[in-house]
Image (cartoon, rainbow, N blue to C red):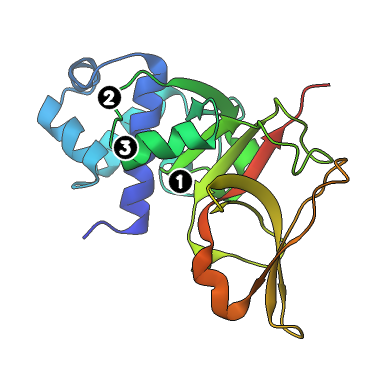
Amino acid sequence: MVNAVQDLFSKRLKRLREASGITMVELAEVLGMSQATISEWEKGNKFPRAGSLQGLAIHFDVPLEYFFKEEVHLITEMVSIPLYTNVSQSTLLMCNERLDEKVEYIKLPTSFLGSYTNEDSLEAFVVSEDDMDLLFPIGSTIVVKRVGRADLVDGDIVVYFIEDAYSIRRFRKNDAEKVFLFKPESTNPLLYDAVIPFEQIESIEVVAKVIWYGVLV
């Protein structure tokens, strides 16, 4: 079973290697290791000894702590996130497992993503609705993490599916009236709160929550 430190090491090693544009074979030659060993490291199946870990830190010019302390980040470290035209395209590809189709990527500094930096399931897409245009206008890019209803926290901005359409709203829970609210923050006066009684929450399919957004000015 992979522990948290080993998992963090494997993800950051792979990220560094791919960002530097070298193959496992090339890295193995630099370190005097076999490709199989590098592969096992990146899969999280094995953890290098102290000497090998130091060799990796020297080769990639990073502090040793970067490999096993989550709070240590590189100033210039970037994360690549798949970018879709909209949430419908993202969901279609995911549900049909058409992941072999060509997908564009955006790169964001790890500092933008905070505690979500090491998440594997982040996606980005271009906003095509005005539900939240007081925060991010149509055409803005948002980054989301896939979640379910049970994962929601009051105040989250969520992507959800209702009445054959996707929407992005602020999630609120009203215990006094026993309802969930999906509230727009929009300049559009025709938009109104979606009010869902507790017992009808199954009618809502929650897709993801927004963890970052970028606005063009």
- Do we see residue 74 in this rendering? no
Residue receiving disc 3: 53
Q: Is residue 47 above or below residue 87?
A: below
Residue 49, given in percent of the width and then of the height, sits at 24, 43
Nearest to N terminus: mark 3 or mark 2 = 3
Which residue is at the front of the view, 17 or 156? 156
Nearest to N terminus: mark 1 or mark 2 = 2
Circle nearer the viewer, 3 or 2: 2
Decide if residue 61 is on the left or right side of residue 36.
right
Q: Residues within 10 Å of mark 2 (few under 14, many from 20)?
A: few
Looking at the rendered structure, the secondary structure element under dot 1 is loop
Looking at the rendered structure, the secondary structure element under dot 3 is helix
Nearest to N terminus: mark 3 or mark 1 = 3
Q: Please, what is the three-letter code of the amino acid marked with disc 2?
A: Asp
Q: Residue at x 59, y 28 (%)?
A: 108
Q: Residue at x 19, y 46 (%)?
A: 46
Q: Label 3 vs label 1: CA separation? A: 23 Å
Looking at the rendered structure, the secondary structure element under dot 2 is loop
Residue receiving disc 1: 119
